[in-house]
Image (spheres, helix red, strand yellow):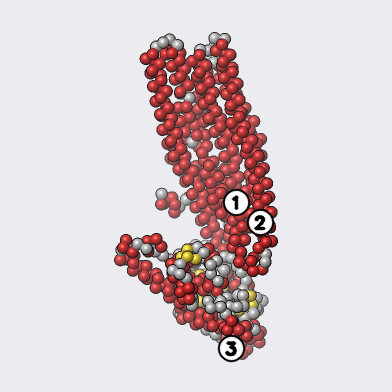
Amino acid sequence: MADRTMNPGTPDCRSAGRYLWWLVTQQRGRVLAGACLGTAWMVSLTLPPYFLSRAIDDGLAKGRWPVLAGWAAAVFGIGLLNAWLAIMRHRTMTRVRMDAAFRSVQVVALQATRLGAALPRKVTAGEVVTIGFGDAAVMSGTLTVTGPGVGAVLAYAVVAGLLLTVSPLLAAVVLLGVPLLVVLLGPLLGRLRGVETAYRVRQGELAARFADIAGGLRVLNGIGGKDVYAARYRHGSRKLRDQGYRVGAVTSWIHALGVGLPTLFLGAVTWLAARMAVQGDITVGELVAVYGYAAVLVVPVSFFVEGGYDIGRGLVAARRVVHFLTLKPDISGGDLAPPPAPAPLHDPASGVEIAPGKLTALVSARPSEPVAVLDRLGGFTASEATWGGVRLRDIDPVRLRERILVADNEADLFAGTLRSVVAGRLDAPDEDARGRTRSLNEDARIRTRSLDEDVARAIHAAMADDIVQALPDGLGSAVAAQGRNLSGGQRQRLRLARALLADPEILLAAEPTSALDAHTESTVAERLRAARAGRTTAVATTSPLVLDHADLVHYLVDGVVAASGSHHDLLRDQPGYRALVSRGTDDDEHGADAGGADGDSGSGGKRGGVATEERTR
């Protein structure tokens, strides 16, 4: 089970039908067991009417009580067998559905990881959630046809054969009537696929809008836009409700006809059999058997209808999943190994070169320009950027990510304890187990203390000690998703602490101090240089407090290096650079006096007079 969890397999994305078939082939044994159990259960349902007919004709009608008792015992026994088969069928098909659902969730999650930075540009977060959970559940229900669906076909054939021994006319009515019922529902099933597709699309759009509102609630409150967005959401919700009514109208007709038509068919067959019994063409026992056979047929016919309904919905859901799985990342990457030793990063488009073991700063009047350079140097954007002479796009992306970290100023903060938020992907101890100290062995306690020490050092380097002290449980305090229970400056310092704890060979940070006041920023800049001593680091910033600690500064104009040198050399020789980085000096000094107690800047996320752009990775 663990292996399946780690490797769900390679899905067949050539079409929706092929994807559903792939889900079947990934668990052939279980599906086969479900088909066998479903078939045995369906066929066994046809035996009690036959046993009853024999009990009446051979026992009750002739007064042979031992024979009657024997057939009654057979009815009781087949009832027990049917109960056991029904239980095992349901258990097996539940496992089939669960496997299909979780396998789809896994491939969707892996594809989301594979798309990486391209994901937000290709699909919304709400749509990913809808696909990964809603559509996965719908597709898993479709696999029910592999069990009872197969059994329904065989049970239908068995009933027709049994009726043939009673009356060829009755057998002909059954053989022709059941397919006619299924054909009558065909147009409704086709219409269902259309309205279901439209409903799913609108549902994904509304989920995305809700995620956007929830994520930006603070901002919406601040600019007074909450009511506007709430009104838009209500409007979208009403349209989704109306679309849901249309789906429900078609679905109700399908379910009503799925139950009503077999019942009418049962009545017609019973009426015909009763007339034949009155005329003496069949016996009373055979009449009872015909009624039982017709009643049993309601079950497989209902499964035919439900199977068609489930397949239609499953194909709609599978199309959405296949579309998502066929999205391509902006950069697919190659299979070359990265340089074995520290080497310079070079971006030909801008002329920027990041020397190994140095702190390099990128400065521009347009914040998007140095950020775009960092994206290229980090391998997140297709370019001719190289690392030690090897093009980044030719390097294995997994190995590239192990050594180069791009610290986005708007990187996600997942819900969890403060310790887990800062630790990131490091092997953090089980939070529940931490409270059971006696159950931890000595190695686990040493590992826990070591992680806490590393986290504390990273937090100190990011000057985030006050965050730990202010929270009630220190490192064990809960942090909400995206750090919504923290201020902007606190979130920024936690992101920086997380990047420093990861200790990558190359750290590329975009505006890591833009939301901090001057005093806090000066300390963070000093500690950042100390923490990254001997490691390759590049920052995009216009803050003179950070630039003063840089070994080399690249001044960009129109996205290209206009001058390079130390901060003081550029101040002396470049008037444009001097005007840019000096423009926010007065604001910085004011921020040092008026900044919040938690180290936030009063400038609303600006440094050097240039606003930091929000970016989603």
In the image, is residue 164 above or below residue 496?
above
Amino acid at circle 1: His
In the image, is residue 356 above or below residue 392?
below
The residue that disc 1 covers is 323
Amino acid at circle 2: Tyr
Amino acid at circle 3: Asp
In the image, is residue 166 above or below residue 203?
above
Is disc 3 surrounded by few (<14), some (14 to 19) or many (20+) residues within 10 Å? few
Residue located 45% across and 43% down the image: 95
The residue that disc 3 covers is 569
Q: Residue furthest bottom?
A: 572
- Mark drawn on residue 233: 2
Badge 3 or badge 1: first in the primary sequence: 1
Residue located 43% across and 36% down the image: 87
The quarter of the displayed image where residue 302 is located: top right
In the image, is residue 446 above or below residue 361?
above
Q: Is residue 598 visible?
A: yes
